[in-house]
Image (cartoon, rainbow, N blue to C red):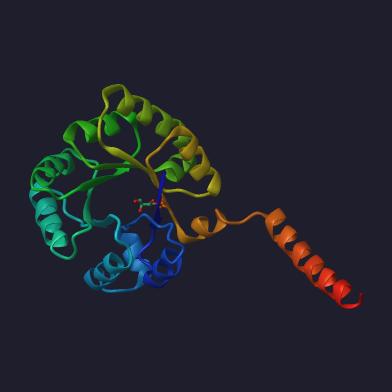
Amino acid sequence: MKIFLDTADVDKIRALSATGLVDGITTNPTLIMKAGRDHKQAIIEICKLVKGPVSVEGIGNTAEELVKDAREFAKWAPNIVAKVPMTAEGLKAVRILEKEGIPTNVTLVFSAGQALMVAKAGASYCSPFVGRLDDVSESGMHLIEEILDIYDAYEFETQVIVASVRSPTHVVEAAKMGAHIATVPPEIFEKLFKHPLTDKGIEQFAKDYAAAAKGAKNK
Ligand code: E4P
């Protein structure tokens, strides 16, 4: 399973990609705004740090506008993926861009019907937002299960990016279901390494190591 970072924070990406475990990046206009950086400059830096796919989102409404934005983004680096919204116009743009060799990631997917259309349009990636579904008392992870069943049944090549991840549990559940990718905020990525018993064990072993060394010295 691949893990992407869902952020445009270049310092965080630099630090966390040093683990060798960051397989790609997803961004959106909100994340760019939070990073407080020039969009193009931030994306170019990110693409140098991470060799995997980097999703970049524009704000066009029509297929024509979305294609124009995506063609511009694709010039910035070889690993750019054009993020397009889950609309009929977005899917028209997907067909054009994929034919041109520009990979697409369809974002803001909230139903299995939408995910089916994404795959039929030939998108490289489909991003269902699990956290935002949980927020409105629907099951985000149930949607992932449905999408994976449909994609498996027809051997669609579109990869599922589990997005809007709010906890390590979302990631583990996604992995158990066989989702291709989870894109996670940096805090969740860091939490995936942690367990209180690991910390406690390390502390105890360090104490015992020192005590053993002291004991050997006194013999
Ligand atoms: C995915 O590509 C989106 O950037 C992201 O996961 C949105 O998550 P949010 O619901 O936390 O804003």
- Residue 76 image position (x, y, % from top left): 17, 65
Tell me the residue at 16%/61% (across/down). 73
Write the residue at 34% across / 73% down.
Answer: 36
Q: Is residue 105 left or right of residue 89?
A: right
Position of residue 95 in the picture relative to residue 134 (left or right): left
The residue that appears at 20% across and 56% down in the rendered structure is 59
Question: How many marks overall?
Answer: 0
**Does residue 153 appear in the picture of this structure?**
yes
| In the image, residue 123 above or below residue 183 | above
Residue at the far bottom: name it: 217
Compared with residue 108, is residue 43 higher up or lower down, i.e. above or below?
Answer: below
Front residue of 190 and 60: 190
Residue shown at 49% from the left, 45% from the top: 171
| Quadrant into which the C terminus falls | bottom right
Q: Is residue 212 above or below residue 20?
A: below
Residue 194: x %, y % from top left: 61, 56
Q: Is residue 139 visible?
A: no
